[in-house]
């Protein structure tokens, strides 16, 4: 069975695929991949490593015609998947239609990462509506909690289960899902920080961040990444988002966290700091460099948390 639409119909499709075994996973997804290849569609598969290996083995020689990537690597930061992986592939495949299989959620995703996964799924619907794009999102119904599967129903217009035909979804409400996880973000009580009011103060902010990063145990490469994150967040606030920008730093759960807070109001999710195609270049850099990015947009302004995974010092 293939979930691709009729070739004469040009429309965006975004089914959630609930599976309960690796066998069901392979048996359901491989026919859609082969069908897409037969139609000369571009095909991207971005799923966790074990599932990726199973699909590659099942595809055999056809695997060479598919872009296969490990989602646990390229999708470590859920906020960067849309623009950094999906949109980039769609643009590279133009003018051909595209099938993408993206599995952003797996057993082991943390509570800190999860809201960004839901918002990513919600924004897919805005980014590709009206385009000849199919994005199948597998969900492990055996391992994931029921609350995660319920959220998948709110972000996908159709549902697909092994052995059953695809069905419409009355729970589909991506705007509600995005807003529900547009959670206020707060720095830790012991966070330290500085305010950047002008471009002349960027050097001081980078030096401040580097000193904190060294104390926290960042290696040289991570210090380079931290300086880059600080530069891009502060520059974005000054240029695009009604600076000044307040930067704060703290340690949490093996991460070094950097918060950027400014007074800009963001009403359009695709114009905000969520890794979407319309994001200004600086924030795209932050999404690419950081291990996790969380965002909140509200009437009081915008808050961005960028996290680098490091070992906490004793």
Image (cartoon, helix red, strand yellow):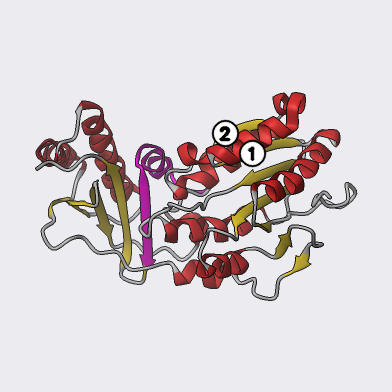
- Out of 138 and 235, give the one closest to the viewer: 138
Which numbered circle lies on residue 45? 1
With respect to residue 85, does 237 lie above or below? below
Q: Is residue 107 left or right of residue 88?
A: left
Whether residue 101 is visible to the viewer of this picture, yes or no, is yes
Query: What is the quadrant of residue 294 in the picture?
Result: bottom left
Residue 289 on the magenta segment:
yes
Q: For mark 2, does the 10 Å Cα neighbourhood hold few (<14), some (14 to 19), or many (20 or more) residues?
A: some
Question: x%, y% of residue 200?
Answer: 16, 39
- Looking at the image, which residue is at 56% across and 61% down? 122
Question: x%, y% of residue 74?
Answer: 48, 38
Which residue in the structure is indicated by mark 2? 69
Q: Is residue 268 left or right of residue 97?
A: left
Residue 295 on the magenta segment:
yes
User: Please, what secondary structure does the residue beneath circle 2 have?
Assistant: strand
Which numbered circle lies on residue 190? none
Tell me where the magenta segment starts and ends, as one range.
277-297
């Amino acid at each position: 069975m293939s979930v691709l639409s009729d070739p004469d119909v040009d429309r965006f499709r975004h089914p959630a695929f609930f599976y309960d075994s690796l066998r069901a996973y392979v048996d359901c997804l491989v026919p859609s991949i082969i069908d897409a290849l037969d139609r000369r569609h571009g095909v991207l598969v971005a799923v966790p490593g074990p599932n990726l290996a199973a699909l590659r083995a099942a595809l055999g020689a056809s695997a060479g015609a598919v872009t296969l990537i490990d989602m646990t690597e390229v999708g470590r930061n859920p906020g960067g998947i849309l623009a950094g992986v999906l949109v980039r592939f769609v643009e590279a495949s133009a003018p051909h239609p595209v099938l993408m299989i993206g599995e952003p959620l797996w057993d082991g995703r943390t509570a800190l990462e999860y809201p960004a996964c839901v918002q990513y799924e919600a924004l897919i619907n805005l980014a590709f509506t009206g385009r000849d794009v199919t994005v199948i999102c597998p969900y492990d119904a055996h391992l994931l909690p029921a609350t995660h599967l319920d959220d998948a129903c709110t972000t996908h217009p159709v549902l697909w289960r092994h052995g059953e035909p695809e069905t419409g979804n009355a729970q589909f409400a991506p705007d509600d899902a995005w807003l529900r996880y547009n959670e206020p973000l707060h720095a830790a009580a012991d966070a330290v920080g500085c305010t950047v009011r002008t471009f002349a103060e960027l050097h001081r902010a980078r030096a401040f961040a580097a000193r904190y990063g060294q104390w926290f145990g960042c290696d040289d490469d991570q210090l380079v990444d931290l300086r880059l994150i600080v530069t891009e967040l502060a520059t974005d606030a000054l240029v695009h988002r009604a600076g000044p920008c307040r930067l704060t730093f703290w340690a949490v759960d093996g991460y070094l966290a950097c918060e950027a807070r400014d007074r800009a109001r963001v009403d359009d999710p695709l114009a905000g700091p969520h890794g979407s195609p319309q994001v200004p270049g600086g924030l795209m850099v932050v999404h690419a460099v950081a291990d996790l990015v969380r965002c909140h947009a509200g009437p009081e302004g915008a808050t961005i948390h960028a996290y680098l995974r490091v070992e906490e010092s004793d």
